[in-house]
Structures are given as C-alpha cells and as structure tokens.
Image (spheres, rainbow, N blue to C red):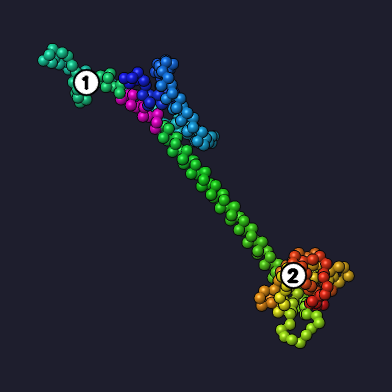
C-alpha cells in the first residue's frame, strides 16, 4: 500500500488472479470495500484476464499423455529440504553503546525481517506472471499449428482435385485411342453434296464404334458460317429411327474442326452421317438441307 492509502497496481493484479493467501486476500478485500479507486483497478484487471482467457484456444490433454506424465512424476525422487540451524552473529558493542548485527552475508548473520520481506514480495509478484507468459507462448504455438494444419488441408484438397482432373483426362485419352484402334470401328467420309470440282473441297471423316457409342469426327476446308450459326453432326440410325444429334462445331480460320467423343447411346448401328447448319447452340432435329453426308 502506498502513501495515498491505495494498493499498488501489481498487488491488485495478483489479487485479481487470486494468488494471495487467505489472510492477505481478506485484508485487500476489506480495503476494496471502502476504496472505489482500487475496486476500479481490480475490475480492469479481471476484465483483461477474462479477455485473455477467451482468446486462448483450450485443448484437453490426451489421456495417454496425462498417464505418462503422472508415471514420470511418480518416478522422480522427492527432494526433502534440510533445515539448517541459523548461525548467530557475534555480539558487538558500538561506541554508542548499542548492539547490532554484522551487515555482510559472509559473516554468518541473521537476516532481518525487513530484508527478507521485500525478496518474498518480489518473488510473489514475478513468478505468477511467468506462468501467464508460458500460457501465452503455448497459445501462440497452438494457433500457428492450427493455421499450418489448415494450409496443409487446403493443399491436399487442391492436389486431390488435380489428381481427379488428370485421371479424367487419362480416361478420355484412353477412350480416344481405343476408338481409333478398335477393329470394329466404322470409317465414314463425308463430302459436300452435290460435289463440285473446285478444290479444295470440304471433307469430314467419322470414326464410329457402335458397341461403345464412341465417335471421333475430323473436318477440313469447312466454309465459314454467318454469325450465330453452327455446324451440327447427325447420326442416322440403320433401323429407321430419327437422326441423333452428335455434336456441334465451328471451323477455325483454316476451315478445320472436330467433334471428339460426344455423348451417344451405345449399340446404335449407323446407316449414314450428315451435317447441317443450325442456329448457335444446335437443334434436336436437323434443319434441311444436309450440306455434307456420307454412308
């Protein structure tokens, strides 16, 4: 307590953390009942402690780790403090007729109560804050580990998506190779109808496997289209059913185009293939005339 009859801020912080003995806490509590200034400081300390406690992420200790710790503590040897008798200081008389004790620690004197009390107060103020500093360090470490775990989880998710995409690409490439090398594949050449003698002529080639419903179409020398128009490939079934749309395409600047593995039903035998010009987006029924065809 200082000259203004108020407790120091450090003492009030220790009181807020309940680190005083019952007697000291009761003495401070009695002072707080009559001192609004000290009560306000205690309230501020308690609020700071509550906010700090809410920011630290609490983790329950694993049962196995706690069991190992208790076994280790049980194996530790207990240090029994040995009481040493105090060494009295030789009695000396001063010129003034007063008795005193030697002031050097090496002289084997008793320590005055006034010298011991400040050291005990300093230790009582410092050591509790060491525990809070360790707790803060653990909270920072736990937060860093949490962010690292989140980063690793995001990286693993991204890698899984990349693996799925590569697997899908590999499956499509295998299906493409199987279609091109299948011995049962139908090879159909599409030409412009009616054919003219002016080279180069638009031409398309279809590789079709009825068993799997897989199709590859490659075209060259295709004529450019008007805006909002597209070419559409048609599969004409051999059983007389309506033509089946087999994909739309736009030629590039050199007239090249392709349709790779469009979604087609399996097991449909084709009598012919045709190409029409449709509105952009395609159609479910061909719009006449058929500009290119092949049987």
Locate residue 78, reporting x and y percent: 39, 27
Q: Is residue 63 left or right of residue 102?
A: right
Residue 179 at least partly seen: no
SS at badge 2: strand
Read off the residue under disc 1. 109
Q: Is residue 173 left or right of residue 148?
A: right
- Most frequent secondary structure within the magenta stretch: helix
- Residue most toward the right? 240
- Image height check: is 43 above or below 232? above
Residue, x 50% and y 44% (percent of image)?
145
Magenta region, residue range = 119-130
Q: Residues within 10 Å of mark 2 (few under 14, many from 20)?
A: some
Read off the residue under disc 2. 229
Camera-near label (2 vs 1) is: 2
Locate residue 15, reporting x and y percent: 42, 23
> How far apart, in angstroms, are the residues tagged by discs 2 and 1?
109 Å
Quarter in which the C terminus is drawn: bottom right
- Image height check: is 121 above or below 293? above
Quarter in which the N terminus is drawn: top left
């Amino acid at each position: 307590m200082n000259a203004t009859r108020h407790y120091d801020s450090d003492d009030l912080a220790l009181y807020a953390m309940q680190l005083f003995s019952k007697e000291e806490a009761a003495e401070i509590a009695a002072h707080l009942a009559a001192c609004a200034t000290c009560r306000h400081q205690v309230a501020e300390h308690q609020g700071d402690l509550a906010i700090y406690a809410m920011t630290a992420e609490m983790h329950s200790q694993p049962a196995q780790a706690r069991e190992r710790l208790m076994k280790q503590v049980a194996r530790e040897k207990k240090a029994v403090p040995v009481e040493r008798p105090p060494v009295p200081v030789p009695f000396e008389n001063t010129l003034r007729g007063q008795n005193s004790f030697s002031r050097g620690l090496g002289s084997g004197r008793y320590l005055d109560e006034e010298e011991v009390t400040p050291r005990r107060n300093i230790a009582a103020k410092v050591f509790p804050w060491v525990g809070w500093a360790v707790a803060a360090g653990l909270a920072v470490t736990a937060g860093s580990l949490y962010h690292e775990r989140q980063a690793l989880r995001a990286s693993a998710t991204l890698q899984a998506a990349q693996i799925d995409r590569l697997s899908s690409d590999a499956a499509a490439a295998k299906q493409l190779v199987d279609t091109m090398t299948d011995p049962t594949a139908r090879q159909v050449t599409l030409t412009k109808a009616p054919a003219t003698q002016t080279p180069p002529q638009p031409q398309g080639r279809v590789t079709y496997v009825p068993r799997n419903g897989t199709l590859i179409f490659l075209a060259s020398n295709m004529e450019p289209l008007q805006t909002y128009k597209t070419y559409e490939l048609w599969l004409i079934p051999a059983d007389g059913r309506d033509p089946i749309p087999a994909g739309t395409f736009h030629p590039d600047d050199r007239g090249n185009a392709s349709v790779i593995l469009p979604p087609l039903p399996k097991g449909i035998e084709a009598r012919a293939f045709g190409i029409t010009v449709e509105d952009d987006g395609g159609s479910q029924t061909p719009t006449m005339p058929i500009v290119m065809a092949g049987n």
